[in-house]
Image (tube, coloured by chain):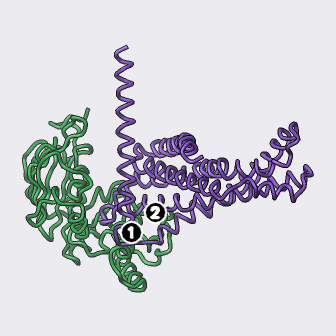
Amino acid sequence: MREFFERLGLMAEKAVVTTGQIIIMLFQAVYYLFLPPFKFRNMFKQMEFVGVRSLFVVVLTGSFTGMVLAMQGYNALKRFGAESLVGPTVALSMARELGPVLTGLMVTGRAGSAMATELGTMRVTEQIDALYTMAINPVKYLVTPRIVAGVLMLPVLAIITDFVGVLGGYFVGVKLLGINPGVYIGRTIDFVSVNDIFYGLTKSAVFGLIITLISSFQGYHASGGAEGVGRAATSAVVLSCVLILVSDYFLTSIMF
Amino acid sequence: MIEIRELKKSFNGKVVLDGVNLDIKRGEISVIIGRSGEGKSVLIKHIIGLLKPDSGRILLDGKDITTMSEKEFREVLKRFGMLFQGAALFDSMTVEENVGFALREHTDLPDSTIRKIVKEKLKRVGLEGVESMMPADLSGGMKKRVGLARAIAMDPEIVLFDEPTTGLDPIMSDSIADLMLDTQRALKTTYVVITHDINLTYKIADMVAMLHQGRIIEKGTVEEMKANPNPILRQFLEGRAEGPIKVF
């Protein structure tokens, strides 16, 4: 019994220490963002990595999610004779919830794991130490551009996901299930407000911060060779996904 | 130039450095020898600020670098270069970008000038025409040479070497030793080398210090060390399993 509580205590201590370290890294990254010299090249490189290279996967995910939402929505709403509400159902679900969350989860799988692996490899092969010895702050050089890229690019990706999701929903609802296109578009415009889109984008910016901060942190503190790098990548993905879903609940309860 | 005074460091209760005292003179090659796991890397990481000591001081030209602010120490770091054991080249960059990295980050030199400096540094370490290659395409010896070119790119006053010949064949090790001598003599730089390679030590060292059980137990010139009767030093220099140092 005593051993159980000791272990529990150690786990709690580790969780508190890690949380503190993550918060410190966030403060450092933000501080260095405003500290000259400003080198934008690295930032644009990360924006391309997080944003442009995730485009294909989010377009694919968004369009099929919109399509399946329309199909499921049609089947459910048909029972009440409310097929005309398929458009708003798809658009609201995408803008408020699925656009930001799916984009976050997809970017975690694609870019978050790659970030943790890259920084983890740099850590275990002393490349991060090499940066430090060249009088370059590793957090400023490696972490700050990644966080900026995440916070700026996730909303861009989320709005693309929203758009292709709505398009996918339109295709299934109008072209395959025969809903009147005027009713579909009209009802969508009636029900979806700018705030729905704005709050969704705010959520995705928060998810961008979570993904890049957690992935950078896990990679930056990797140890123990190839196995340690693998562990860092796994932790980055699992922790980011969990935090996205948990924070989504709290953000939703605050915003809507 | 560098004075290390009563430097102590422990990890999880295990004492690694137990009051190290050492003077490193300007313009010399100082070699710190010792068995693997004796804390040589820990010592060099303290000199370059990668680790903070539990107690003790490291004075650079009389100023204690262990108590400096981050901003102050970053300026001090510009006086240093370091060659890591595995070269630690940035694997997402070409050789040219690796060697010119610090110049691009810390100076406003035009790119053409940086490329010229990079070419000259690579030539100094015996490499030509490798600028566009990636680190993954280089052999172990070439990586060390590129690492050395990167370490001297900013013309530092002090260059630290962490096991510069580990993992290299004897011929390549000897050529790295020659290279270190050539560059040191040409640039009049202070070199601090940690190694357990005795041939390298005999070839390049102006001063040798032996680290054992967290302390510097002997120091002197190569000739003085060769003549030193200390049985621990003798066992290490002669590479014998039998002696006061227990292997298992």
Residue B74: x percent and y percent?
Answer: 25, 65
Local secondary structure at mark 1:
helix
Determine the residue located farthest toward the front in the rendered image. A190
- Res B124 → quadrant: bottom left
Residue positioned 16% across, 56% down in the render: B66
Residue positioned 10% across, 67% down in the render: B61
Residue A206: x percent and y percent?
Answer: 52, 52
A81 left or right of B204 in image? right
Front-lying residue, A253 or A158: A253
Label 1: few (<14), some (14–19) or many (≥20) C-alpha neighbours in 10 Å: many
Specify the subunit that label 2 lies on. Answer: A
Chain A tint in image: purple
Determine the residue located farthest toward the right in the rendered image. A178
Kind of residue sitting beneath label 2: Pro
Residue A28: x percent and y percent?
Answer: 35, 56
The answer to whether A188 is drawn above or below residue A71 in the figure is below
Front-lying residue, A194 or B32: A194
Inter-mark Cα distance, 1 to 2 = 27 Å
Where does label 1 land, which residue? Answer: B146
A127 left or right of B2 in image? right
Chain that is coloured green in the picture: B
Where does label 2 land, which residue? Answer: A145
Q: Is residue B234 visible?
A: no
Q: Is residue A98 visible?
A: yes
A204 left or right of B39 in image? right
Residue B71: x percent and y percent?
Answer: 24, 65
Front-lying residue, A171 or A105: A171
Local secondary structure at mark 2:
helix
Front-lying residue, B95 or B47: B47
